[in-house]
Image: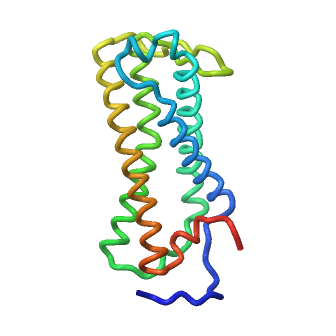
Amino acid sequence: MHARHPFTVVERYSATAQLLHWTTVLLVVVAYIVSVGGSETRIYSSVNDFSRGLHELLGLAVFALSLVRVCWRPIFPPPKSPEMPAWMELGARLGHWTIYALLVLVPLTAILGAWLEGHPLTVLVLGNVQPWVPQSRQLGLVLANIHGWLGDVLIWLAALHAAAALYHHFWRRDAVLLSMLPGR
């Protein structure tokens, strides 16, 4: 274990990167919680209109923020990582890019799945967004199923990501976690 000096200057992500990160975290968690899930008839039941609309709105917000984050990262690169074994550095890079990919793929599979099934997006505040693709019910159902699986993988991977940050903070005693936390 490395001892962390109490006056060590921590290289941080920018305030904008932190805001994008934590807003994405919040939106993903809430979208996952309010997700109706289940069969097509359950998801598109009028009883679930509000939950589905909220889930779709949150999903579109995640999609938009993720596109901003993917564009932001090359322009404003993350702070230098503390020294760590090559396998850990590789795992961190693969984990980050897998999370980014999922943050784009989860909403895309939902949008395409719904539209291919013939359902509009029912986005709260915006109203219905009619399908932009020709209907293909079977493909839509497959994509809707993939959406559910990818959403679960995203949640598990995000939990692993959080556990890794806690490992860095409490076990390795480096600044990985602190670099994404607001503060001085």
Viewed as shown, does residue 86 lie left or right of 13?
A: left
Name the residue rendered at 71%, 74% in the picture: 184
Residue at the spot x=49%, y=90% of the render? 3
Q: Is residue 89 above or below residue 64?
A: below
Of the pair 38 and 11, the residue shown nearer to us? 38
Determine whether, in the image, residue 26 is placed left or right of residue 91.
Answer: right
Percent across and percent down for residue 119 are 46, 12
Model colouring? rainbow
State whether residue 66 is above or below residue 45: below
Is 140 displayed left or right of 122 in the figure?
A: left
Image spot of residue 161 (x, y percent): 42, 59
* Front one among 46 and 107: 46
Foreground residue, 59 or 170?
170
Q: Choose top left, top right, bottom left or bottom right for residue 49.
A: top right
How many marks overall? 0
* Image: 173 above or below 117: below
Is 159 placed left or right of 129 in the picture? left
**Percent position of residue 148, x then y:** 36, 32
Q: Residue at x 34, y 72 (%)?
A: 88
Q: Position of residue 123 (x, y in %)?
A: 59, 21
Q: Which quadrant of the figure contains the N terminus?
A: bottom left
Q: What residue sits 58% from the left and 65% below the top?
A: 180
Q: Quadrant of residue 94?
A: bottom left
